[in-house]
């Protein structure tokens, strides 16, 4: 349904990942004819839902990232499918970057040159199969409010990110015991000076210190005789750690511009969820990790060696950045009592490793 008016632009761009649909190979065995993002869901192409979600937030700078085989039918659908053409705003750009393979991870995708050049500011990453009843504007407003005084500076490197997780336990018809979940460890987070209104997503704020998929957790337990090794530095910094294993990553990330440089510096990163967010979270308490990952230099505005060669030298920002409190997660209770988790940065007094 077209919208009569457009909400004001928040200054974000969106990357919608239109993957090959390997888990739906019965329907998507020929992506050159019918890619996953065009499969019908309630008589609408699957892609319509994340596009509409972005439009309702005022985000119209949208790039659809897809393998080369799926690009022609996707572009044709955007031009001719009545449901997709009914969406207001400019047509999304279709990007089929060289080097993108069927098995490429999401963090690997962020390192591709064409994707790096396409990201020009703070951005939202979401998948083409994302369908949500939660108004994206509420989530986006939390990301903006959690970065006060920085939200207006679109190139600030002290901005944090925001990631959403949803509960799977007791969700009949939505999830089952066989569904893959995530391991999320959090610590209490200080409450804001001004309490949020009732029903706000700001309620129940916590800080994430560790996150990984459950299958990675199980591998770790198998390697350590069913014991989970915990570093002493974590317990020294946080004495009250909560562990949750019944939540799942929604694969929706509000990320600041500097995250693309963070992903580019770490060629071993494969997944945004497990690697980018996981190492980002650990860098808040593990000694020397921020320096090892190049996160100190990224937040200080120093480009990698490859970037320096392409831009004629490093670019430094005058502002000194503390990298020891990089990562936190916010757990919010909606009116329905459903918790969400939000990953963000926070500024704090300087600490030393």
Image: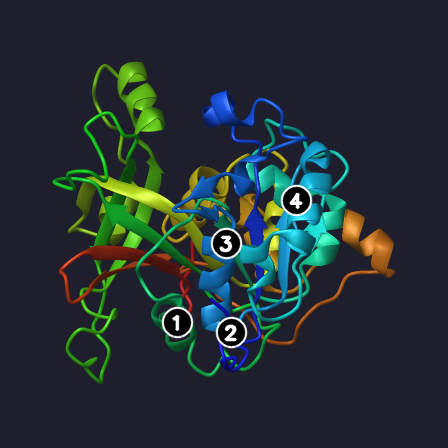
Q: Which residue is mark 3?
A: 48
Relative to 289, say whether 340 is above or below: below
Q: Position of residue 119 (x, y in %)?
A: 67, 59
Q: Earlier in the sequence, mark 4 or mark 1?
A: 4
Circles 2 and 1, Cβ within 8 Å, touching? The answer is yes
Residue 277 position, x and y percent, is: 44, 47
Contact between labelled residues 2 and 3, with CB atoms less than 8 Å apart: no
For label 1, the SS is: helix
The numbered mark, 3 or 4, whose residue comes first in the sequence reads: 3
Q: Nearer the viewer, residue 13 or 7?
A: 7
Mark 1, Cα crowd under 10 Å, few <14 / some 14-19 / many 20+, is some
Sequence-wise, the earlier of marks 4 and 2 is 2
Does residue 251 appear to the left or right of 339 in the view shown? right
Per the image, the residue denoted by label 1 is: 137
Q: Nearer the viewer, residue 213 or 278?
A: 213
The 10 Å Cα crowd at callout 2, few under 14, some 14 to 19, many 20 or more, is: many
Q: Which residue is mark 4?
A: 74
Give the distance between the C-alpha atoms of the residues marked 4 and 2, in whole angstroms: 23 Å
Dividing the picture into quadrants, the one containing residue 108 is top right
How far apart are labels 2 and 1 at the CA level? Answer: 8 Å
Residue 163, given in percent of the width and then of the height, sits at 39, 55
Q: Quarter-wise, where is residue 245 in the image?
A: top left
Disc 3 from disc 4: Cα separation = 12 Å
* Residue shown at 57% from the left, 75% from the top: 11
Graded by Cα atoms within 10 Å as few (under 14), some (14 to 19) or many (20 or more), the crowding at tag 3 reads many
Estimate the x, y position of residue 348 in percent, counting from the top left.
38, 70
Disc assigned to residue 58: 2
Residue at left offset 57%, top offset 70%: 88
Tell me the number on the disc at residue 185. none
Say which element carries label 2.
loop
């Amino acid at each position: 349904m077209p919208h009569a008016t457009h909400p004001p632009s928040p200054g974000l761009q969106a990357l919608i990942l239109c993957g090959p649909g390997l888990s739906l190979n019965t329907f998507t065995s020929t992506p050159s004819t019918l890619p996953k993002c065009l499969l019908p869901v309630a008589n609408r192409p699957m892609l319509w839902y994340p596009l509409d979600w972005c439009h309702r937030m005022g985000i119209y700078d949208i790039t659809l990232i897809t393998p080369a085989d799926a690009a022609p039918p996707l572009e044709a659908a955007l031009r001719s499918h009545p449901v997709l053409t009914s969406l207001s705003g400019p047509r999304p750009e279709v990007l089929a970057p060289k080097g993108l393979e069927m098995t490429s991870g999401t963090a690997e995708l962020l390192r591709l040159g064409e994707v790096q050049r396409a990201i020009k500011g703070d951005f939202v990453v979401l998948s083409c199969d994302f369908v949500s009843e939660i108004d994206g504007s509420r989530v986006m407003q939390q990301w903006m409010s959690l970065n006060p005084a920085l939200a207006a500076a679109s190139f600030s490197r002290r901005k944090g990110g925001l990631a959403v997780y949803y509960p799977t336990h007791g969700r009949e018809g939505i999830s089952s015991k066989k569904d893959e979940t995530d391991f999320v460890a959090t610590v209490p987070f200080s409450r804001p000076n001004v309490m949020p209104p009732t029903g706000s997503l700001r309620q129940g704020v916590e800080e994430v210190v560790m996150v990984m998929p459950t299958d990675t957790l199980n591998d770790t337990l198998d390697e350590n005789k069913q014991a989970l090794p915990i570093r002493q530095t974590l317990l020294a910094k946080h004495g009250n750690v909560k562990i949750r294993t019944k939540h799942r990553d929604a694969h929706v990330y509000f990320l600041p511009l500097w995250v693309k440089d963070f992903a580019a510096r770490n060629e071993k990163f494969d997944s945004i969820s497990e690697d980018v967010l996981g190492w980002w979270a650990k860098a808040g308490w593990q000694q020397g990790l921020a320096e090892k990952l190049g996160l100190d230099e990224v937040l200080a505005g120093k480009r990698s060696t490859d970037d320096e060669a392409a831009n004629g030298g490093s670019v430094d920002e005058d502002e000194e950045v503390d990298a020891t409190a990089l990562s936190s997660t916010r757990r919010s209770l909606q009116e329905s009592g459903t918790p969400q988790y939000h990953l963000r940065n926070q500024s704090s007094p300087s600490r030393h490793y």
